[in-house]
Amino acid sequence: MTLATGWAQTPTKSSYDVIIVGGAMYGSSTAWFLSDNPDFTGSVLVLERDPSYENASTSHTNSCMRQQFSNELNVRISQFAADFVKNFRSYMGNDSRVPQLSIQSYGYMYLADNENFAQVLRESHAVQVAAGAGTRLMTPEEIRRDYPFYNLDDIVLGSHNKVDEGYWDCVAVFDWWRRSSRERGIEFVANEVVAMTKNAAGTRVESVTLKSGEVVSCGHVVNASGPRAVRTSRMAGIEIPVEPRKRFTYIFSAETPLDRELPLTIDPSGVHMRQDGKTTYLAGGHSAIDPAVDYDDFMMDHALWEDHIWPVLATRIPQFEAIRLINEWAGHYAYNTFDHNAIMGPHTEVENFIFLNGFSGHGLQQSPALGRGTAEFLTYGEYRSLDLTPFGYERIVNNRPFAEKAVI
């Protein structure tokens, strides 16, 4: 039996080498990279609880990428993402059906209004430049010369990079990862994992139980459940510091549009804004009190726009005092409260339980590299393209954060 979307509701087999829990960006990335690796010859089942993806983080993303991170590994990860997007058809086997993609590189503009944050930008800039990023530090005078629409009265330093930073078409990548994976024999099923059974020693997950009642055996299970990551891990008796945090996005037009593209600007207030179309703009932010929310809580906080977001926009860019709100939505970050970085690789005790969780808002741009890395680990038992071991679960057990400071 199939759904109207073409998704099967039940697996065709009772056992798979890899079961991926979650079929959004990361589940699909891992599935595709497995299908693309000639050394992987196993069977793969991708289980997605909601094939409409209506409330998935993938569907609510602002679809941007940057190289402005505070640690080198995250810079390298985004550099691969940029190469993957710009050479997407080539990576997809030069399939003529696959679109040629590019990056709208208006860049990220971090603004510092105090010396402490300016020093953080300087330190991160050194890391980025050493990794080959095109980041440059800018004085207020230099920012004003290039972007005269900003009010910079309180700004002491900016950090900007127009090389492979900006908007990319994640929908096209996501769609083709799923389509190509299916064509290569990866099985996508619309169903939900409700339980896991471990062996007597508790060192392996032997099977997953589906909401429809089927029990499916597995060689490895990959947790690609986004903000629901801890709900999945608890089925294997594992706790991880990942929770859903609500983030708000707004699309608006300006009565007087800017005369050049607006970089993705991270205001010191935490509000961010960027170009979204020729005459439209995007802004985002969150409430000052930022708790974990219910998995199904996507209610808008309408006071946030009037009391915080719009005033910040109008203060930073006076032309944004006269604007018209066109659209708005709320989505969830899969927020790693421990150190704001990915958790990936095997659990320290349940050896075949693989994490792919906790991206804290920069997950979409990391999905090519981390999906590839997970596929490598499943195939070879190690990472081969990039050393992703700093993201391992053992750092949480040992209380050794691998911190990322550049979290929006």
Image (cartoon, helix red, strand yellow):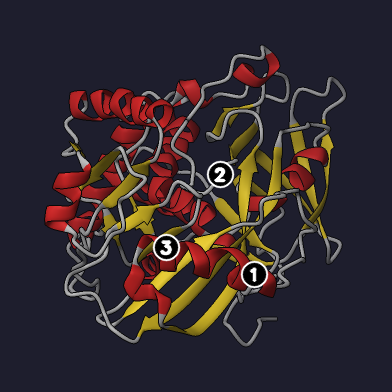
Alpha carbon distance from label 3 to label 2 = 27 Å
* 405 relative to 84, above or below: above
Residue 79 on image: x %, y %: 25, 41
Closer to the eye: label 3 or 2: 3
Q: Quadrant of residue 243?
A: top right
Give the mark, 3 or 1, whose residue is nearer the N terminus: 1
Q: Nearer the viewer, residue 180 or 253?
A: 253
Residue at the disc numbered 1: 55
The crowding category of the residue bearing disc 2, from other C-alpha atoms within 10 Å (few below 14, some 14 to 19, many at least 20), is: many
* 366 relative to 278, above or below: above
Residue at the disc numbered 2: 360
Quadrant into which the N terminus falls: bottom right
Give the mark, 1 or 2, whose residue is nearer the N terminus: 1
Residue 194 on image: x %, y %: 83, 54
The amino acid on which the numbered mark 1 sits, given as a three-letter code, is: Asn
Q: Nearer the viewer, residue 62 or 19?
A: 62
Alpha carbon distance from label 3 to label 1 = 32 Å
Residue 301 on image: x %, y %: 70, 70
The amino acid on which the numbered mark 3 sits, given as a three-letter code, is: Thr
* 387 relative to 83, above or below: above
* Rendered image: mark on residue 144: none
